[in-house]
Amino acid sequence: MRSVPDFSIEKNTGKKIIAGADEAGRGPLCGPVVAGAVVFKKFDFDDMPIISDSKQMNEKQRDIAYDWITNNPDILWGVGQCSAAEIDELNILQASLTAMTRAINAIGVDVEYCLIDGNKMPKGIIGESVVKGDAKSLSIAAASIIAKVTRDRIMKDLAKQFPQYDWDKNAGYPTQQHLQAIDKYGINEHYRKTYRPVKERIEKNANSKCS
């Protein structure tokens, strides 16, 4: 049975300004990793739509939840991201934590306590990590929706510039069709050059030029 997130963890902190943070885009071969951070100023809503782990929601449900979160005066939110170049420099774990820190800072208020999805805490952030937090905490689940919708929209915008890769459909993940497109059209500045499928193709091209 699927777990339904609620405000239990938030209430148990004893704090008032609590941010949930989550990221989207660790697995794709290209594009940024994007994080969302959400603060609910109250825990009682009569009109709350479905808010759950964004991966368990369809696109329409995510869009409805995103609009409700971002237009609600009783909710504060922020977005942060790390580019493909930063991911290559930092590694994806540190880039994800950095993106979450940026999202928390983008909220624009002094957050007392942070609930971070996963098992790692960003440096300098006060709070706790929550494994599978998007299935437990509504603040984290809401942040996962902000992150997912924002990143999907970024990839759709990039797909207009680079339609040959079908990023609007694959979001940068290594589908067979995406890998075939990389083989045919090569890589560009939006690719994560330290990721194995991309790195292998760079090395293969370099070796073929030398031979």
Image (cartoon, grey):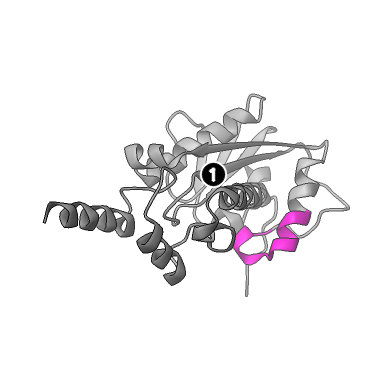
Neighbor class of circle 1 (other Cα within 10 Å; few <14, some 14-19, many 20+) is: many
- SS at mark 1 in the image: strand
- Name the foreground residue: 196 vs 37: 196
Q: Residue 199: image x %, image y %?
A: 28, 53
Please tell me in which quadrant of the rendered image residue 183 appears. Answer: bottom left
Residue linked to disc 1: 34
Q: In the figure, is residue 164 to the left or right of 183?
A: right
Quadrant occupied by the C terminus: bottom left
Which residue is found at the position 45% from the left and 69% from the top? Answer: 177
Q: Main secondary structure of the magenta part?
A: helix
Q: In the figure, is residue 99 to the left or right of 18?
A: left
Q: Does the magenta stretch include residue 11?
A: no
* Residue 14 visible here: no
Q: The magenta stretch spans which residues? A: 52-64
**Label 1 amino acid?**
Val
Q: Is residue 171 above or below residue 177?
A: above
Q: In the figure, is residue 197 to the left or right of 59?
A: left
Which residue is found at the position 83% from the left and 36% from the top? Answer: 73
Q: Which residue lies furthest to the bottom in this view?
A: 1
Q: Residue 92: image x %, image y %?
A: 39, 46
Q: Which residue lies furthest to the right in this view?
A: 46
